[in-house]
Amino acid sequence: MKRNILSITVLISSLLLCSCKYQANNKNVQKDVRLGDTYVYGVHPDSAARQSKITYTPNPDLEKRTNALRDKMFGAGSINEGN
């Protein structure tokens, strides 16, 4: 009985120690196929990408629907109230 408890304790402690560096190895290094693409990354690392500068014409029906959903989910308060 003591041997079983000892072996289970050693097994559990070894698993716990092995999981300490788990996130260090948990990455997937892939080749970036869009590296240097100004549409995705912009012309400079500090600049905005071209795809984020796209503007759409406002649709008042969607604004009403958005506000109705916001009121349903978060109450009738203002979104700018904060916590």
Image: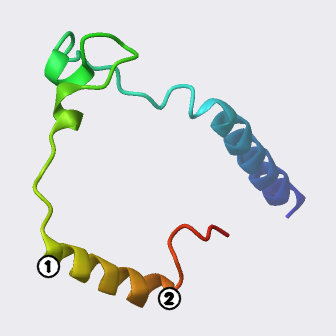
Q: Quadrant of residue 3?
A: bottom right
In the picture of the structure, the residue carrying the numbered disc 1 is 61
Which color scheme is applied?
A: rainbow
Residue at horizontal 27 percent and vertical 20 percent from the top = 30
- 55 sits left or right of 13 in the view: left
Q: Quadrant of residue 70?
A: bottom left
Return the x and y of residue 75 as percentages of the image width and height. Answer: 50, 88
Nearer the observer: mark 2 or 1; the answer is 1
Amino acid type assigned to the residue bearing label 2 in the image: Gly
Is 15 rendered above or below residue 83? above
Residue at horizontal 85 percent and vertical 64 percent from the top = 1
Is 24 rendered above or below residue 60? above
Return the x and y of residue 69 as percentages of the image width and height. Answer: 32, 83
- 39 sits left or right of 43 in the view: left
Q: Quadrant of residue 24?
A: top right
* Pick the front one: 69 or 31: 69
Residue at horizontal 51 percent and vertical 26 percent from the top = 25
Residues at marks 2 and 1 touching, judged by CB atoms closer than 8 Å: no
In the picture of the structure, the residue carrying the numbered disc 2 is 75
Q: Is residue 25 visible?
A: yes
Is 35 rendered above or below residue 9? above
- Is the C terminus in the top left, top right, bottom left or bottom right quadrant? bottom right
SS category of the residue bearing label 1: helix
Amino acid type assigned to the residue bearing label 1 in the image: Asp
Return the x and y of residue 46 as percentages of the image width and height. Answer: 40, 16
